[in-house]
Image (cartoon, rainbow, N blue to C red):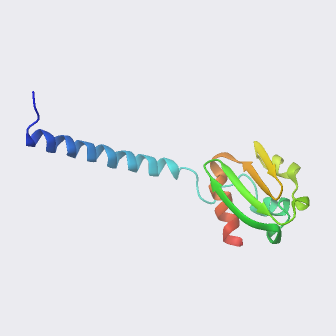
Amino acid sequence: MGFNNSSLVIMVVLIIILLIGLIIYLSKRKSSIPKSFLPFEIAVLIKALGELDNIKEIDAKLSKVNVKVKDPLLVDITTIKELGASGIIEKSNSYTFIFGNISEIISKEINNLL
């Protein structure tokens, strides 16, 4: 059994339809959390990081927020844990906070203020 041209075209069309459906599904799933939804005020986290002046850089990857600060002595780890960070990694002037699916929102909110 071989494939003729019409069978090949039908297979390609079906694959394209499945890929489009998958892209639509994933885009709707990703945006299921409202962009403005945070379980805490962003100002509280900023204060716990030593205010905006102390934040050199912030970004998010998957479920983690990576923050570089000027003075690590100004960072209030206890408050950040109370805000919901399930894990914290400290390295000299940088921190990684595990905030789960709100990590990207946190990063965007703070970057908008920097």
Determine whether 11 is above or below 1 in the image. below
| In the foreground, 59 or 1 | 1
Image quadrant in which you'd find residue 51:
bottom right
**Does residue 112 appear left or right of residue 91 in this picture?**
left
Q: Quadrant of the N terminus?
A: top left
Q: Residue visible at 53% across and 49% down?
A: 32
Q: Residue visible at 82% across and 51% down?
A: 80
Determine whether 15 is above or below 74 in the image. above
Q: Residue furthest top?
A: 1
Residue 85 in percent (x, y) is at 76, 46
Residue 45 in percent (x, y) is at 79, 59
Residue 8 in percent (x, y) is at 15, 41
Determine whether 97 is above or below 44 in the image. above
Q: Quadrant of the C terminus?
A: bottom right
| In the foreground, 31 or 67 | 67
| In the foreground, 96 or 26 | 96
**Does residue 9 appear left or right of residue 55 in this picture?**
left
Residue 3 in percent (x, y) is at 11, 35
